[in-house]
Image: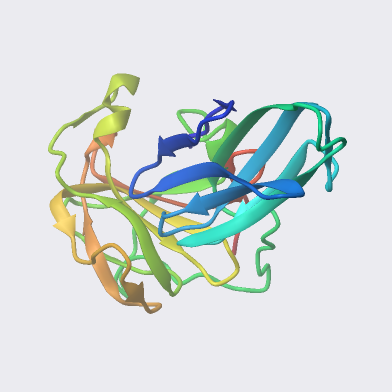
């Protein structure tokens, strides 16, 4: 997933993720300086911050790691002046990525199969699949199914990212940006990805709460896909975002 390093001098740092922004800004007060972060995304983000300082004393150990809930504003750290009569310098670096690194998956949860009850589809590629299921994407399942198969939510949550405008796909990695998908945030801070959906194949909207077993879209072959299938994975923040085993 996306992550960034930003240098913050005396100006505000400001960058965009997919449906919102993450902004770090400074508030100067009489006895200290505050660094705040604002997250306007529909999902939480983890932020890592470090600073080069002169004649300032941080009230938290640096570098620090914190998280910003969705649509929130949080104080990250205060710096007190060592001497109010002298000047000071502050140079700050930060990066952020999707998800709360402190979230803990509910390992007892058993996910519903993301297709109609009673139907059966072959798993063309499972965990540690040699074609594309490796690294941060190693724990994913590819269900071979015809384009237009109904896709259902495997777990309840909020739709935080989606794409359905793409109509391209193929077996080369340069097709990766063209996958249609839905990402759902669960109540334990983890996410589910439903990928390679067909063109205009999304039946939900951003910010919508969905229940387990609710129709959310239709399978396809958009993006990096050698044929029509559903790529399903559960992921969480872990020094950026990584998939992990699930039931």
Lateral position of residue 69 relative to residue 181, left or right: right
Give the quadrant of the C terminus: bottom right
Q: Say if 129 sits above or below 119 in the image.
A: above
Q: Quadrant of residue 148?
A: bottom left
Can residue 63 be seen? yes
Q: Is residue 42 above or below residue 109?
A: above
Q: Position of residue 194 (x, y in %)?
A: 36, 54
Frontmost residue, 125 versus 13: 13
Q: Is residue 48 left or right of residue 126?
A: right
The answer to whether 181 appears left or right of 69 in the picture is: left
Residue pictured at 22% horizontal, 38% vertical: 222
Kindly identify the residue that appears in the image at 34 percent across and 22 percent down.
Answer: 173
Q: Residue at 26%, 67% (x, y): give it.
A: 216
The answer to which of 207 and 12 lies nearer the viewer is 12
Vertical comparison of 171 with 151: above or below: above
**Residue 243 shows up from this direction:** no
Q: Position of residue 58 (x, y in %)?
A: 82, 41
Image position of 159 with respect to 143: above or below: below
Residue at 67%, 73% in the rendered image: 108
User: Quarter of the image holding residue 165?
Assistant: top left
């Amino acid at each position: 997933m996306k992550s960034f390093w930003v240098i913050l001098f005396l100006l505000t740092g400001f960058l965009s993720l997919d449906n919102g922004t993450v902004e770090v800004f400074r508030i100067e007060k009489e006895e200290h300086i505050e660094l705040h972060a604002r997250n306007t995304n529909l999902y939480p983000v983890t932020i890592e911050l470090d600073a080069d300082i002169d004649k300032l004393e941080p009230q938290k150990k640096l570098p620090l790691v914190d998280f910003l809930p969705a649509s929130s504003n949080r104080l990250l750290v205060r710096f007190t002046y060592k001497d109010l009569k002298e000047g000071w310098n502050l140079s700050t670096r930060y990066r952020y990525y999707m998800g709360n690194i402190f979230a803990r998956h509910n390992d007892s949860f058993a996910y519903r199969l993301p297709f109609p009850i009673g139907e059966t589809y072959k798993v063309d590629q499972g965990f540690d699949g040699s074609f594309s299921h490796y690294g941060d994407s190693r724990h994913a399942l590819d269900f071979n199914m015809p384009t237009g198969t109904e896709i259902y939510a495997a777990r309840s949550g909020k739709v935080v990212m989606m794409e359905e405008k793409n109509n391209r796909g193929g077996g080369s990695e340069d097709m990766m940006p063209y996958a249609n998908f839905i990402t759902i945030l669960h109540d334990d801070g983890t996410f589910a990805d439903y990928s390679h959906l067909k063109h205009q194949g999304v039946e939900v909207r951003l910010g919508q709460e969905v229940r387990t077993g609710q129709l959310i879209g239709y399978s396809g072959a958009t993006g990096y896909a050698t044929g029509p299938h559903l790529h399903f994975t559960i992921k969480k923040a872990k020094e950026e975002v990584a998939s992990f085993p699930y039931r």
